[in-house]
Image: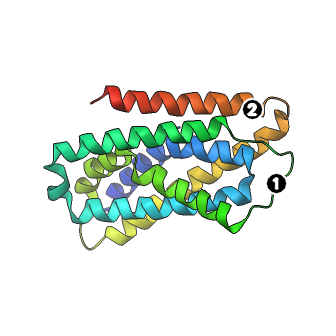
Amino acid sequence: MLFMDYMIFIITIACVSFLPGLCMNLALSLGLSVGFKNTLYMMFGELLSLLLVILLCAYSLSFIAQYELFFKIFKILSSIFLLYIAYTLLKAKFAEAECVISNKAKFVLFAQGFMATISNPKAWIFMLSILPKFISLSNIYILSTIILLIEFAALCTYALGGYAFRFFLKDYAHILAKISALCVALMSFYILYDL
């Protein structure tokens, strides 16, 4: 790959990663509710599942692309999961200081991040559409690392924004969480509508 190809790839991934979506919304909401350090568990789950999506898409592009029914079932299951995320955002409690969480809660955060990406059809479709243009077996790990670093920077930006935002909105954080939950629920209905 040429230098210009890498630059186009980086700019494309950065533009898509920093757009508000499910994972960024989740990072913002968790930054508000549990603090930045605890949101890192969700981020690690999200990044692991993103790596899995990248590798599965890169190694099985032709196989995945030929099963339209698979994507429809996947969209329905993803929509149900998004509704669950919206429900948990609605029920979230907000603390003034960063809270200490148990190992079980850390695993739940990790699992939320993992499931948010692995069940997101937009992540799969985007990777299936962008990877063939840039990927080869010789550069798959370089491109995967670039994607993960950009995604981590985007997640940190949203989580730190949520963490900082809660100090400005001490009395109104629950309203922001409800708006976030509504956005996630609308995204779920949009995925179902798109079927």
> Tag 2: Cα neighbours inside 10 Å, few (<14), some, or many (≥20)?
many
Please name the amino acid that badge 1 sits on.
Glu
In the image: residue 134, left or right of residue 149: left
Residue 80 location in percent, x, y?
42, 39
Please name the amino acid that badge 2 sits on.
His
For residue 174, which numbered disc appears in the image? 2
Tell me which residue sits at (13%, 49%) in the image: 66
Numbered disc 2: secondary structure: helix
Q: Quadrant of residue 86?
A: top right
Of 136 and 161, which appears nearest the observer?
Answer: 161
In the image: residue 28, left or right of residue 138: right
In the image: residue 9, left or right of residue 20: left
Of 1 and 161, which appears nearest the observer?
Answer: 161
Q: Is residue 163 above or below residue 171?
A: below
Q: Quadrant of residue 57?
A: bottom left
Query: Does residue 138 appear in the picture of this structure?
Result: yes
Numbered disc 1: secondary structure: loop
Considering the image in quadrants, where does the N terminus appear? bottom left
For residue 98, which numbered disc appears in the image? 1
Tell me which residue sits at (68%, 68%) in the image: 103
Query: Does residue 1 appear in the picture of this structure?
Result: no
Tell me which residue sits at (39%, 27%) in the image: 190
Residue 139 location in percent, x, y?
31, 70
Q: Quadrant of residue 100?
A: bottom right
Whether residues under marks 1 and 2 lie with C-beta atoms below 8 angstroms apart, the answer is no
For residue 165, which numbered disc appears in the image? none
Choose the circle earlier in sequence order: 1 or 2.
1
